[in-house]
Amino acid sequence: MKNRKIVIDGSILSNVHSGIHRFMIENLVELDKILEDGDVKVEIIYPRGLKIDIPKFENIKIKSLSYIPKCYRYIVLPLYLKFSRAVYCRMDNGSPVGKKNISCLHDLIPITKEGGYEESEVERYKNRYKLIAKNSQTIVTVSENSKNDICKYMKIPRERVKVVFNGWEHMQRICEDDKIFEKFPKLKNGDYVYALGNILPHKNFNWIKKVAEKNPNICFAIAGRMFQTGKEEEIVAKNIIYLGRVTDEENKALMKNCKLFVHPAKHEGFGIPPLEALACGAKIAISSASCLPEIYGDCAAYFEPDDYDISIEQLLKQEVADKNKVLDKYSWKKSAQRWYDIFKDAL
């Protein structure tokens, strides 16, 4: 392990915040604390000139590499890894470089029927997954359900796939912004059903439209990048309020004050919004599909993702276990310790 290190690709940290962005940042913040013993050296790299959003670390090093168009990925980056004797790590579903990578695949949604991708896109992703399977010594994912998918579709032995869950403690640092209710006067505090996400097919937001139509006296509020596919008309109903992209502070206020948080996804890698909602004290009702029952157990009310006749009042009446049963199970600190162990084994 002497003189070797883990090099993490930080390029994605220049993008708009997403669940993957959150996963990276929160794990790195906690990992930075564990690295005090010096056993494992970790460095984040990115192309020079790219502006990345990243906190200040005590033990994780940050380094920009010369950016030469068309040469960075195929010449600059491989040479740096070779001369650094480093193990390359992608936490963001990205492609590997070289032969001994640590690759994190949050899900295989692009190649599932729920993903709704064009056939050419599906083939492109399948080729990427083949490359990841061939050139990764370890693949990390975020739930046992996703691990099963990876082992099945990528034909990878189970011992090569490690699970690192999401956490929720970042919600404690966020101060809610109640001004969101001034922006949308129709939103009555404590009297709306809330959902967070985008309009991609696997998120199944059509469920909200159909359930809203059958529950006309209940207000539904949806936040997220809903207009990115041009299919916003699919979720229009008289009692649905589209909020657009909201800040972390506005999102916390919306979660804290909703009567119910719903998550109707047909496929997820982990599904962090319901965990965030639980941390804010909301009751959650989620789809019974994919990894969601694995993650949330009996702490959530459930519905079938294709059941549009469900009553919101019925969901509210479903008995659920104490939220701490879930919150005690997951934490960024525990997840960072898993990354540390994975890095140590890799070196």
Image: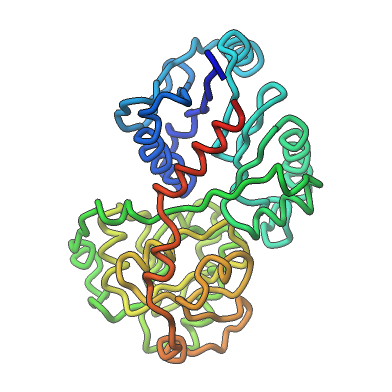
**The C terminus: image quadrant:** top right
Quarter occupied by residue 265: bottom right
Q: Is residue 211 above or below residue 162?
A: below
Q: Is residue 95 left or right of residue 286?
A: right
Q: Is residue 57 visible?
A: yes
* x then y, percent, for residue 215: 44, 88
Color scheme of the displayed model: rainbow
**The N terminus: image quadrant:** top right
Kindly identify the residue that appears in the image at 52 percent across and 27 percent down: 9
- Depth check: give the residue in front, 299 or 308: 299
Kindly identify the residue that appears in the image at 32 percent across and 51 percent down: 170
* x then y, percent, for residue 82: 63, 11
Query: How many marks on residues?
Result: 0
Q: In this view, does 295 lie above or below 284?
A: above
Kindly identify the residue that appears in the image at 49 percent across and 45 percent down: 20
* x then y, percent, for residue 317: 41, 91
Q: Is residue 13 above or below residue 247?
A: above
Q: In this view, does 105 lie to the left or right of 23?
A: right
* x then y, percent, for residue 191: 29, 81
Q: Is residue 17 left or right of residue 266?
A: left
- Depth check: give the residue in front, 149 or 53: 149
Quarter occupied by residue 241: bottom left
- Depth check: give the residue in front, 230 or 279: 279
Q: Is residue 1 above or below residue 163?
A: above
Kindly identify the residue that appears in the image at 50 percent across and 78 percent down: 298
Q: Given the current orientation, which residue lies at the most extreme right position?
A: 155
Q: Is residue 44 visible?
A: no
